[in-house]
Image (tube, coloured by chain):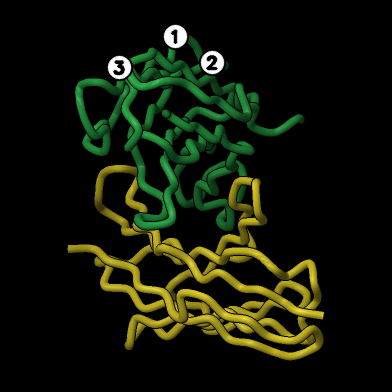
Chain colours: A green, B yellow
Amino acid sequence: DAGVIQSPRHEVTEMGQEVTLRCKPISGHNSLFWYRQTMMRGLELLIYFNNNVPIDDSGMPEDRFSAKMPNASFSTLKIQPSEPRDSAVYFCASSLKQGVFGLAGVGSYNEQFFGPGTRLTVL
Amino acid sequence: KNQVEQSPQSLIILEGKNCTLQCNYTVSPFSNLRWYKQDTGRGPVSLTIMTFSENTKSNGRYTATLDADTKQSSLHITASQLSDSASYICVVRNSGGGADGLTFGKGTHLIIQP
């Protein structure tokens, strides 16, 4: 498997523009997470989906942020309009959510596999 | 409030030396604790996971410890190599909460100098 795929890897845009980040999770995984990482705040969970359904979006900073997962193999994170303070690295991660004694064994514990990230710069 | 505190924030050591990174947490009820390694320009990758009943677990030159009573974990790196230069992130899962129950530390930035 190629792992979690994110695009673009780098995005530079001007304030006010719409930005769309894309993610393809690992095939077979049923949970998908969007994170934002900055030096000051570390990794912050923005939103996560289980079986394509948004479960918790309490980390989404403002209405300018929206995320969709139209199917099990694709998700987008959109920022409209973008602002300079949105500059950060955005990570997508996926996992196989299951019980403690699920098919993958006791030791799986829903490990999240991260993509390479999208470095967003808003000028 | 669930919190994960890591120390030091950054660390510079010479190649070949050992080092220990610390993680203190207040997450409750505790489920497990995972250490991630994040190379520059890449996403985090899991190094090891500790459950309540485990005190020590090794993965090559990496050894993680967990003291569930004091709510502390450490990651010890033996005979450091240049490739160990990275950020190390401690993540604690609680067994009841939302957001998939994860609380992230801000990480320790480790630099190995030749």
The residue that appears at 67% across and 56% down in the rendered structure is B39
Check chain identity for marks 1 and 2: say if they share one.
Answer: yes
Q: Nearer the viewer, mark 1 or mark 3?
A: 3
- Residue A17 in the figure: left or right of residue B14: left
Q: State the residue in front, A66 or A69.
A: A66
Give the image location of residue A19, x and y in percent. Answer: 43, 17
Chain-order first, disc 1 or disc 3: 1
Q: State the residue in front, A20 or A104.
A: A20
Spot the residue most to the bottom: B17
Which residue is disc 3 drawn over? A81
- Which three-letter amino acid code belongs to the residue tagged 3? Pro
Could you say whether the residue bearing mark 3 is in a helix, strand or loop? Answer: loop
Give the image location of residue B76, x and y in percent. Answer: 62, 84
Chain-order first, disc 2 or disc 3: 2
Could you say whether the residue bearing mark 1 is in a helix, strand or loop? Answer: strand
Give the image location of residue B106, x and y in percent. Answer: 41, 63
- Which three-letter amino acid code belongs to the residue tagged 1? Pro
Could you say whether the residue bearing mark 2 is in a helix, strand or loop? Answer: strand
